[in-house]
Image (cartoon, coloured by chain):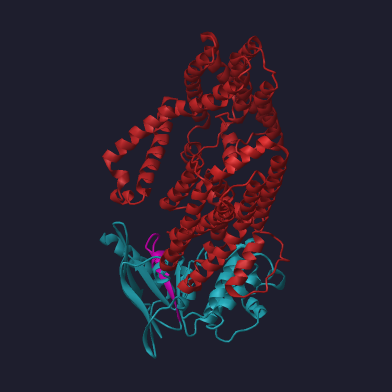
Amino acid sequence: MRFVIDHLAKRFGGKEVLKDISFGFESGKIYGLLGRNGAGKTTLFNCLNRDIRMDAGAFFLETEQGRRDVRPEDIGYVLSAPTVPEFLTAREFLKFFIDINEKTIPDLRPLDEYFELVSIEPEDRDKLLKDYSHGMKNKMQMLVNLIAKPPVLLLDEPLTSLDVVVAEEMKQLLRGQKEGRIILFSTHIMDLALDLCDEIVLLNHGILEEIDKANLDSQEFKQRIIAALREEDDHE
Amino acid sequence: MNRTLRLSFSLKNAYRVNSILYSLKQIPFLGRLFPDVLYQVRGLKIFANVLSVIWEIVSIFLGKLLYFLIMIAGAAALYERADQEAVFLHILFLLTMVGAFMNTYIFNPTRDKYYAMFLMRMNAREYTLIHYAYAILRVLIGFAVCAAVFGRMSGLAIWQCLLIPFFTVGMKLTAAAWYLYRYEKYEELPNENDMNRLSWILLGLFLAAAYGLPAMGIVLPEPVSTALMVLPILSGALSVKRILGFAYYREVYQLVLAQSAVQMDQAKKAAKTQANRYIAADTGITSSRKGYEYLNELFIKRHRKILWKSSLRIAAVCLVLTVAAVFGVCLSPEIRETANRMILTWLPYFVFILYSINRGTGFTTALFINCDHSLLTYSFYKQPAHILRLFRIRLREIVKINLLPAAILGAGLALLLYLSGGTQDVLNYVVLVISLPCMSIFFSVHYLTIYYLLQPYNAGTEIKSATYRLILMATYLVCFYLMRVQMSTLLFGVMTIAFSLLYSVIACVLVYRYAPKTFRLRN
């Protein structure tokens, strides 16, 4: 399966944030999306999640049965600031989510098993989400997005504000979940991207381009990424 | 000193000019005509600067004119039997005493103070003193003019009118010095936006003394209040020294501004904590339903405090008032006659009453901040069929919540009409019983519809839609205006019923058509 973006463009007022995004993502891989502040990473994700309307272009899935449109349930989106309904307990949120999506969830399991997947302790499962810490909310958001097994998972800076233990747990979780799906992971932190991602994609001046790792060691690869981001800057 | 003066005023002005330009851009339709770079356009900037200066001058007088007109001269005129000059001074004296402590200017947590002292790191003492001197000067000028106008109209001598602004300023200075002294000695600070219980009680006592005593015929004699007004002028003069010599302004503002929500992020946080507080912590609350009904039931149960509980409380008040009115009508023939006449012509008044007791805005705010704000980031939640399904459920709930008080009022009015002598046309009863619930349904539909069609909030839970604000304001104005309309209950009732039904149908059609597109987080 491939997730293809075709000539996507978006402008705000007079500013062209996304000029011409075209790219094909392969399933089974984690893509690290790097870009400077204000490069448009979140805008790109918002367009893909249909939170904002794009001005031009399209995106679709290429499966063995052929090309098809992306349905809302095909996309999972985890934001950097975790958003969970605060008036529900973790268990209630999970139950609600499964109620709604039970037809599309493959191999449904008991709720507690899901909690174990992201190591949320039994005593925390019946607490209101408003009393959850940042990291725990993040786990819940990630969990809900994993259960539905959407073919495309967008992660916007998800590990940046987590403590080292939770961040490591989440990394393991993502590595374990990448089979059969496309994970697009935006971050500012290069080491994180290099550690977790299979491919590095740059978003710079409104265009996406892949940086080929070829035979470089990680130090050389870093230099190359930074050079690419700088170079583009000098063009302006 | 001179530099601080210049800088701080240009900072305040820049802030205001940018706010004016920002609001120009927010006007629906018209806003689109302005370019995106409007903050650079010279002509617009000059225009906004002119507005800013005009506002600076107008605001010296505007609030004070209203204050004198309504709170002092207007209120004094109500005590017809009392000596006008004495009542005027009596109220003025007592209100000024409270006002000096409640509004010190020096402790007002405002955004420009935060910008100047913390973001721009201006000298706190210099900045504070300059602005305080300016604020005091404005009080002096504003009060001099207002006291002259209203004082003379109430029959005071010119020298008494002249005394008023100096007395006011003296009180303000004294209060400020008193607070500064408290801080030096005990590190205590007043928080003007969040008064404690003692302050509320004192406020109540002073207000009662200002307005209650004259009603009982007790008024400070004119010579006494005049003499009392001289004292603060002396104490104010002495206070200047303390205010000038106070060494901890930066420290004080650190505390004052931290308590308040002037910082942008804090304002957001405050709204969120407020809404979060409404969530009942009782995890004994459960639901046996499924899917969206499950979500809805838990939402309603956990927000009982602002939804059902408050609706039931309002319903109880309506019931008590109705019973009281029934007694009144049964006991007194005069009340009977008035009630009968009022019920047959005052139905428009009830639009405003139902507007005031409607829980619609509280419901949609809680819906957004505690529920939709997070769930709208999940794609399953945004599927058109799901949006509409939840809309139906929510509409049903909010209609139910608001219906009870309206039904009690409707039935109560019909009963009162019957007991107060009745009417020839039986249709009047029917109209009363039906039209009030209809109005209530209208408001429920109205608030939920504009929420779904405009979804005014962004991810930071700020209202970003000027259209939404304008509609809320227009709703208020229309309801307020209707209070002055007198029309036969039959005619107005039938019109209301027809309007409410028509509006509800149109609103639902619009929601079904457009909400799947409009019900999104704003950027």
> Is B85 inside the magenta-drawn segment?
no
Taking the spot 66% from the left edge, 48% from the top edge, the residue there is B318
Quarter location, residue B440: bottom right
Taking the spot 31% from the left edge, 36% from the top edge, the residue there is B47
> Is A40 inside the magenta-drawn segment?
yes
Residue B118 position within the rendered picture, expressed as x and y whole percent measured from the top left: 50, 40
Q: Quadrant of the N terminus of chain B?
A: top left
Residue A52 position within the rendered picture, expressed as x and y whole percent measured from the top left: 39, 65
Chain shaded red: B
Q: Give the range drawn in magenta.
A: A29-44
Quarter location, residue B21: top left
Q: In which quarter of the image is the C terminus of chain B?
A: bottom left
Taking the spot 38% from the left edge, 73% from the top edge, the residue there is A201
The answer to whether residue B273 is visible is no
Chain shaded cyan: A
Taking the spot 49% from the left edge, 69% from the top edge, the residue there is B387
Front-most of residues A141 and A67: A67
Establish if B432 lies above or below B69: below
Residue B189 position within the rendered picture, expressed as x and y whole percent measured from the top left: 65, 34
Establish if B5 lies above or below B301: above
Establish if B499 lies above or below B514: above
Front-most of residues B101 and A132: B101
Left or right of B302? Residue B149 is left
The answer to whether residue B95 is visible is yes
